[in-house]
């Protein structure tokens, strides 16, 4: 997913499974604290600081708190020419929140690896998006494609229901503009349900650069009236230039992401169909008894795996878990397509003992609402580790490869 001005680089794989299992937790869910005190004069200065710091890799020259991982990210992102291979290697194990926004922009190919070109590139791309928004909405909503706009305005309020941040009316209007502008410029695929979900990780990560306190409000636990009022006040403290920058960067990163998986959203969604076939094949090769049980109960993989592929498991996990998973996806070659297939297979195999005891009705209820409410980053890292193991074992291997060794662990 690199832009034309960047040289493609193959990401080095994780050396061994323990690297993921031992990785430190980089995205956590915290219980809401008392309402924050907001300086409404600080947002514009913060926006200017973030934009200007892009020339330095988006990195402050301040303390890294003595954390070895922080120091490594600081060193890589402060370089005048980013070592993409090293950044991918570090990011596979999780990106500290302080560096995630810049790292994601670089890994997506939105930012040039050369620091001297970075600020001008961002300014140009943000202006280009702002011009599109102006042209598109200048005549009001009545001039828009009514069918498209209606579908987007229905889907946006349903987006990331577990995160109070995306219930903000101001944020929802911003998401609507991004989705409409993207769909209007991609008529071959157009907007389909699920694309709204893919926008939210980018939007959250870029908001967090401006408002680090936002991490207090990422879960349903932060849904009381008391904390909702504090969150609304915090989001309102963002000035228009900050929202504009977040919106534009989210648009371009979403565009980069969807360019890499566009077969998922063209007519008949052939990319997703291929992924489902591969997931079914992997499960049959890795865990024959589970595959046989699903078949005996007449469970079709498309009945549950379609959503897993269409929404990248975002509806099965909380936002913090999704963001941690995307750190690795961005570091993997074809992370959102090929590697995601192995993650889906690993996700299904995780529940094999429970699933083999269920009949059709209970199987469908389980698979459409898996018990991940209590998942934390460590659970995601274990899932990624297992997916990587399966990729090493089965990627490009003959379909008749014996599965006895792996099935024997069940």
Image (spheres, rainbow, N blue to C red):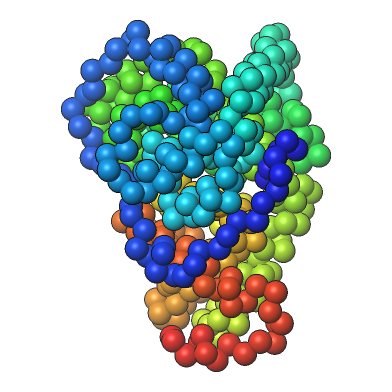
**Apparent side of residue 37 relative to residue 407 in the rendered image (left or right):** left
x%, y% of residue 351?
42, 72
x%, y% of residue 245?
54, 21
Figure check: 394 above or below 116:
below
Seen at 67% across and 51% down, the residue is 9
Quadrant where the N terminus sits is top right
Residue occupying the point 62% across, 33% down: 114
Q: Residue at x 55, y 91 (%)?
A: 404
Indicate left or right for 386 with 217 as reference. Answer: right
Position of the C terminus, as image quadrant, is bottom left
In the rendered image, residue 15, in percent from the top left (x then y), is placed at 49, 67
Front one among 272 and 60: 60
- Residue 234 placement: quadrant: top left
Which is nearer the eye, 253 or 188? 253
Task: Please name the residue shown 71% across and 61% down the image.
Answer: 273
Whether residue 61 is visible = yes
Left or right: where does residue 195 sit relative to residue 65? right
Q: How many marks?
A: 0
Residue 363 visible in the displayed image: no
**In the image, residue 136 above or below residue 406:** above
Residue 341, image quadrant: bottom right
Q: Quadrant of residue 162?
A: top left
User: Taking 4 as reference, is 133 above or below it?
Assistant: above
Residue that protrudes farthest toward the right in the picture: 188
Question: Which is more toward the observer, 90 or 263?
Answer: 90
Where residue 4 appears, as percent x and y from the top left, is 75, 38
- Between 373 and 368, the residue placed more toward the observer is 373
Q: Residue furthest front?
A: 80
């Amino acid at each position: 997913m690199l832009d034309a001005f960047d040289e493609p680089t193959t990401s080095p794989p994780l050396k061994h499974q323990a690297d993921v299992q031992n990785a430190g937790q980089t995205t956590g869910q915290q219980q809401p604290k008392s309402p924050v005190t907001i300086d409404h004069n600080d947002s514009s200065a913060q926006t200017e600081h973030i934009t200007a710091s892009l020339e330095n890799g988006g990195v402050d020259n301040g303390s890294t708190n003595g954390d070895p991982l922080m120091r490594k990210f600081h060193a890589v992102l402060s370089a005048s020419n980013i070592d993409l291979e090293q950044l991918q290697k570090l990011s596979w194990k999780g990106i500290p929140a302080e560096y995630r926004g810049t790292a994601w922009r670089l890994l997506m190919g939105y930012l040039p690896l050369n620091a001297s070109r970075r600020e001008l590139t961002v300014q140009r791309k943000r202006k280009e998006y702002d011009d599109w928004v102006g042209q598109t909405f200048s005549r009001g909503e009545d001039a828009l494609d009514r069918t498209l706009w209606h579908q987007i305005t229905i889907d946006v309020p349903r987006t990331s229901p577990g995160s109070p941040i995306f219930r903000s009316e101001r944020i929802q209007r911003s998401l609507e503009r991004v989705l409409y502008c993207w769909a209007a410029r991609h008529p071959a695929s157009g907007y389909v349900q699920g694309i709204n979900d893919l926008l939210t990780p980018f939007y959250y990560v870029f908001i967090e650069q401006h408002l680090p306190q936002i991490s207090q409000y990422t879960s349903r636990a932060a849904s009381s009236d008391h904390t909702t009022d504090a969150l609304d006040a915090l989001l309102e403290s963002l000035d228009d230039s900050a929202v504009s920058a977040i919106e534009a960067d989210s648009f371009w990163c979403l565009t980069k992401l969807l360019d890499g998986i566009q077969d998922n959203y063209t007519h008949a969604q052939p990319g997703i169909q291929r992924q489902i076939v591969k997931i079914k094949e992997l499960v049959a090769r890795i865990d024959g008894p589970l595959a046989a049980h699903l078949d005996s109960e007449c469970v079709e993989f498309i009945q549950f795996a379609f959503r897993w592929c269409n929404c990248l498991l975002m509806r099965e996990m909380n936002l913090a878990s999704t963001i941690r998973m995307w750190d690795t996806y961005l570091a993997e070659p074809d992370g959102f397509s090929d590697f995601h297939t192995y993650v889906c297979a690993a996700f299904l195999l995780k529940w094999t003992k429970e699933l083999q005891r269920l009949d059709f009705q209970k199987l469908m209820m389980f698979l459409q609402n898996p018990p991940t409410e209590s998942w934390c980053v460590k659970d995601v890292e274990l899932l990624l580790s297992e997916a990587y193991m399966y990729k090493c074992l089965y990627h490009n291997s003959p379909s008749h490869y014996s599965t006895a060794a792996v099935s024997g662990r069940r």
